[in-house]
Image (cartoon, grey):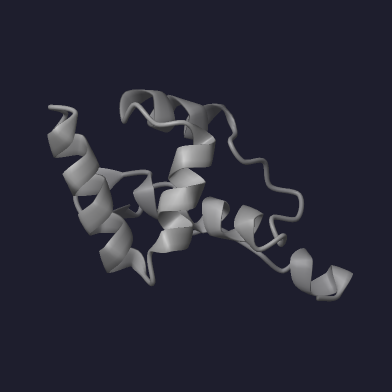
Amino acid sequence: MSDSQSFDFKPRARGLVIGDIPWLARITDKARATDQGRIGAYIYPCPADQRFLQKVQMSAEEFTRLVAECEDDDGVIARMKAHLKGKGLD
């Protein structure tokens, strides 16, 4: 991957909600980009990501692994909903 490709990354908007879980779209994009080595100038986990992760009781490493194991957003949503239910956070 060229340097220009790694810096073309841009996560989805902060306010976009998927699966009725605020911030999930953006942090999913950032986790995928980190895993693929194309995060560029973005920071993962940034303070807002850290607040999300604390709220859902996951580490950045756990969340990145969850995202990497999912084929698409539907998979991430399903896994997160199961995680939240298991923690009594649903």
The residue under the point 29% across, 64% down is: 75
Residue 43 is drawn in which quadrant? top right
Q: Position of residue 74 (x, y in %)?
A: 26, 66
Image coordinates for residue 19, horizontal then vertical, percent? 21, 55
Is residue 66 in view from this perspective?
yes
**Left or right of 52: which side holds 81?**
left
Residue drawn at x 56%, y 27% as measured from the top left: 47
Is residue 81 found left or right of 68 in the rendered image?
left
Q: Is residue 13 visible?
A: no
Q: Quadrant of residue 69?
A: bottom left
Q: Looking at the image, which residue sits at the far right?
A: 3
Task: Find residue 62 and report its horizontal and vertical position in percent.
Answer: 46, 40
* Quarter-of-image position of residue 88: top left
Left or right, 41 with respect to 29, comes to right
Quarter of the rendering occupied by the N terminus: bottom right
The residue sitting at 41% across, 51% down in the picture is 66
Where is 35 relative to 27, above or below?
below
- Give the number of marks: 0
Above or below 70: residue 41: above
Percent of width and height locating residue 54: 40, 23
Location of the C terminus by quadrant is top left
87, 23: nearer the viewer? 87
Q: What's the residue at 69%, 55% (across, down)?
A: 39
